């Protein structure tokens, strides 16, 4: 029995490690695709070069990196990659929107349906939760390398750039703006800070609150969705109770 128990523990530990590794690879692949679409030349795109280096350090197979680069440029032979948006409800009625890029809609739809089902949710029809979200621009400025005085100056610049709302979290500023203002706000902040990123998001205007089991179930759903390599973005309206 002791030997069986030891073998079982090894199998479970390996399964956890494999799952963690797959999630890390999936995240790196998505980063490579995003950056390669901006500029596919690593010699002229230091951010892309850095992501590729991190992928190599994580022992990601060379073919995975090359496939991500080809996918970003639409060069996957014999494959028609489509951009899709899926909507559904997670645990306790949490609204979830998922953006995906897939070369097989049936496979991706089936995968997502099974994931939602596992956590007591349901993949819904188009438009079932879209009304809960608004498109919004988010510009993130890293403050980690700045002193307090410089960080305060960055906040003043953010106001001047046209940010409608400013949040500080984890040594970074999150600037909220209208989608049409995203480019101008981003360019303004890039002029005063070296570490700036931006994205269009679907921001909820109505939330589902919860803690304990609900929080864990929602997080497990999000974690499993993130592991799917077809999925590029996930938005939801869960807000954990403090």
Image (cartoon, rainbow, N blue to C red):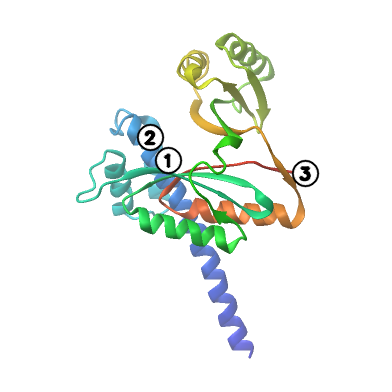
> Is the residue marked by circle 1 packed among few (<14), some (14-19), or many (20+) residues within 10 Å?
some
Please indicate whether residue 214 sits to the left or right of residue 173 in the image: right
Q: Quadrant of residue 151?
A: top right
> Is the residue marked by circle 2 packed among few (<14), some (14-19), or many (20+) residues within 10 Å?
many
Q: Are marks 2 and 1 in contact (CB under 8 Å)?
A: yes
Q: Which residue carries the number 1 mark?
A: 31
Instruction: Tell which residue pokes out farthest to the bottom in this image.
Output: 1
For discs 1 and 3, the disc positioned in front in the rendered view: 3
* Residue 189 picture location, percent across and down: 52, 16
Q: Quadrant of residue 72?
A: top left
Label 2 – label 1 distance at C-alpha? 6 Å
Label 1 – label 3 distance at C-alpha? 31 Å
Q: Against 220, is 142 above or below?
A: above
Please indicate whether residue 135 sits to the left or right of residue 28 in the image: right
Instruction: Tell which residue pokes out farthest to the left in this image.
Output: 77
Q: Quarter holding the N terminus? A: bottom right
Q: Which residue carries the number 2 mark?
A: 35
Element at badge 1?
helix
Specify whether residue 54 is in view: no
Q: Quarter holding the C terminus? A: top right
Label 2 – label 3 distance at C-alpha? 35 Å
Q: Which residue carries the number 3 mark?
A: 241
* Residue 141 picture location, percent across and down: 56, 24
* Residue 134 picture location, percent across and down: 57, 30
Instruction: Tell which residue pokes out farthest to the top in this image.
Output: 160
Q: Residue at x 40, y 46 (%)?
A: 29
Q: Are marks 1 and 3 in contact (CB under 8 Å)?
A: no
Q: Nearer the viewer, residue 141 or 3?
A: 141
């Amino acid at each position: 029995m002791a030997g069986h128990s030891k073998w079982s523990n090894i199998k479970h530990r390996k399964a956890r490690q494999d799952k963690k590794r797959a999630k890390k690879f999936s995240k790196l692949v998505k980063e490579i695709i995003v950056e390669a679409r901006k500029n596919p030349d690593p010699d002229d795109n230091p951010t892309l070069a850095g992501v590729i280096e991190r992928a190599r350090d994580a022992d990601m197979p060379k073919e995975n990196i090359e496939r991500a680069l080809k996918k970003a440029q639409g060069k996957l032979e014999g494959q028609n990659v489509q951009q899709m948006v899926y909507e559904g409800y997670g645990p306790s009625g949490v609204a979830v929107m998922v953006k995906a890029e897939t070369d097989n809609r049936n496979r991706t739809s089936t995968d997502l349906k099974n994931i939602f089902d596992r956590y007591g949710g349901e993949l819904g029809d188009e438009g079932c939760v879209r009304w809960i979200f608004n498109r919004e621009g988010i510009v993130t400025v890293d403050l980690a390398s700045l002193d307090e005085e410089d960080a305060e100056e960055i906040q003043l610049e953010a106001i001047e750039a046209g940010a409608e709302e400013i949040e500080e979290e984890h040594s970074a500023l999150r600037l909220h703006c209208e989608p049409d203002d995203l480019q101008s706000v981003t360019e303004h902040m890039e002029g005063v800070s070296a570490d700036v990123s931006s994205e269009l998001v679907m921001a909820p205007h109505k939330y589902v609150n919860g803690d304990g089991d609900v929080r864990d179930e929602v997080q497990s759903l999000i974690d499993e969705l993130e592991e799917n390599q077809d999925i590029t973005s996930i938005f939801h309206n869960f807000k954990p109770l403090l």
